[in-house]
Image: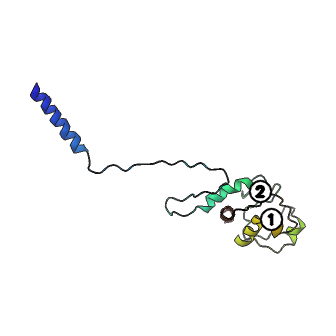
């Protein structure tokens, strides 16, 4: 009986040792990031390690959706539909009633003009009817512009 017990212990020891490895398995760590809607964060793509500005911009643009849409077939509300806005003349969306200031402006939306407008709508186009929506944070403006550019393709 004693030999059988000893044999079982030896056999069990050999089996456990044979199954093991000298390397420890990699530790998997799951991260959950919680942030306020519209607040850019250090979001990185897993493959490139660069800021995903379009995703950040989509998140930041949520504060604009009360007045604007970016859907290809979206309707204009208090503000014009911004689908395809990059490369379009300011005040040039058919079917939307723009202010005289917009209609008279000689602006074609690009990154620089959109950045200036988002930073200070009234200062960039005096007489603009966009009374709310200034985006003082430069990184947030860049993200919104990247998002709008992606909606213009």
Residue 100, relative to residue 34: is it above or below? Answer: below
Residue 93 location (% of width, % of height) = 81, 65
Q: Which residue is mark 2?
A: 68
Query: Which callout, 1 or 2, points at the residue further toward the start of the chain?
Result: 2
Q: Which residue is mark 1?
A: 121
Looking at the image, the residue that sits furthest to the bottom is 106
Quarter that holds the C terminus = bottom right
Residue drawn at x 34%, y 49% is: 25
Residue 119 location (% of width, % of height) = 75, 65
Residue drawn at x 23%, y 40% is: 16
Q: Dividing the picture into quarters, in which one does residue 149 lie? A: bottom right
Colour scheme of the picture: rainbow
Q: Do labels 1 and 2 touch, CB within 8 Å?
A: no
Badge 2 element: loop
Q: Residues within 10 Å of mark 2 (few under 14, many from 20)?
A: many
Residue drawn at x 51%, y 63% is: 49
Q: Does the image show residue 91?
A: no
| Viewer-proximal residue among 2 and 72 | 2
Badge 1 element: helix
Q: Dividing the picture into quarters, in which one does residue 39 lie? A: bottom right
Residue 67 shown left or right of residue 5 in the figure:
right
């Amino acid at each position: 009986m004693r030999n059988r017990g000893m044999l079982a212990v030896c056999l069990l020891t050999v089996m456990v040792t044979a199954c093991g490895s000298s390397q420890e398995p990699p530790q998997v760590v799951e991260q959950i990031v919680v942030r306020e809607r519209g607040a850019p964060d250090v979001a990185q793509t897993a493959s490139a390690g660069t800021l995903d500005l379009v995703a950040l911009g989509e998140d930041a643009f949520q504060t604009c959706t009360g007045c604007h849409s970016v859907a290809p077939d979206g309707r204009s509300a208090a503000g014009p539909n911004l689908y395809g806005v990059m490369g379009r003349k300011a005040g040039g969306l058919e079917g939307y009633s723009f202010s005289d200031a917009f209609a008279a402006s000689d602006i074609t939306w690009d990154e620089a003009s959109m950045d200036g407008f988002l930073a200070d709508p009234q200062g960039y186009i005096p007489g603009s009817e966009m009374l709310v929506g200034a985006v003082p944070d430069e990184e947030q403006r860049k993200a919104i512009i990247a998002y709008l550019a992606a909606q213009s393709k």
